[in-house]
Amino acid sequence: MNDEEIRRVLGLLHQDDTLRAFASLVLGQPPEQGEECLERLGRGGLAVKDEDGGWRARPERFRELLKAAAPPARRLTGEERVLETFLVDGRLKEIPAKWEKRMVVLRHISRVFEPGVRYPEKDVNVLLRAFHDDHAALRRYLVESELLSREANVYWRSGGPVDL
């Protein structure tokens, strides 16, 4: 299907006679418009002639056009699926128990820390509380996984992906 077919269907619905005929068919009523009007609906895919010679509406034509015009669905990566599973509106539903999934989430969270910037523990807690109420566990996991380093209650980013 192409843009021409979409324009044809929209053009048919823009014309009063074909719009009324289509509406009548959808409602199961015999249309007052003539055979030529019904044939135009048929050429546009909005109506089809039954075996007994009568016409019926094909509202599924809209679904066909929408499906044809939709961009192809993008496949999520494994990491995107994990993040979609555990994050709702940017907050963790729960901290993943499995190490691999927890690392995906921790790498995502580590991005809030700018490389080269030193953060007092109080600021780290504020940033992590935005993701989960158990900010202490997140802080501990980030340090254990070497995404953050700590010395004298000061933290800095020491690993993880860097957005360019």
Image (cartoon, rainbow, N blue to C red):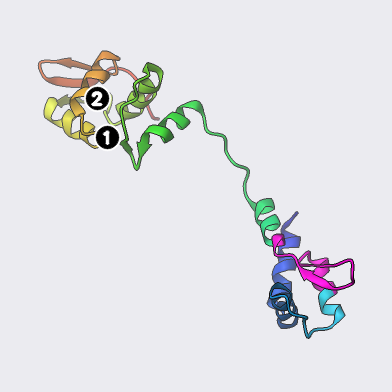
Depth check: give the residue in front, 21 or 25.
25
Q: Which residue was labeled with disc 2?
A: 138
Q: Is residue 4 above or below residue 91?
A: below
Kindly identify which residue carries mark 1: 131
What element does badge 1 sit on?
loop
Q: Is residue 143 visible?
A: yes
Quadrant including the N terminus = bottom right
- Residue at 21%, 25% in the rendered image: 117
* Figure quadrant of the C terminus: top left
Q: Mark 1 or mark 2, which has the lower sequence index?
A: 1
Q: Residues within 10 Å of mark 1 (few under 14, many from 20)?
A: many
How many marks are shown on the rendered structure? 2
| Residue drawn 35% across the image and 22% down it | 102
Residues at marks 1 and 2, CA–CA distance in whole angstroms: 9 Å
Residues rendered magenta in the picture: 39-61
> Which residue is drawn at the image coordinates 24% and 23% (left, top)?
116
Hey, which quadrant is residue 48 in on the image?
bottom right
Q: Residue at x 26, y 14 (%)?
A: 144
Residue type at tag 2: Leu
- Residue 152 pos. (x, y %): 10, 16
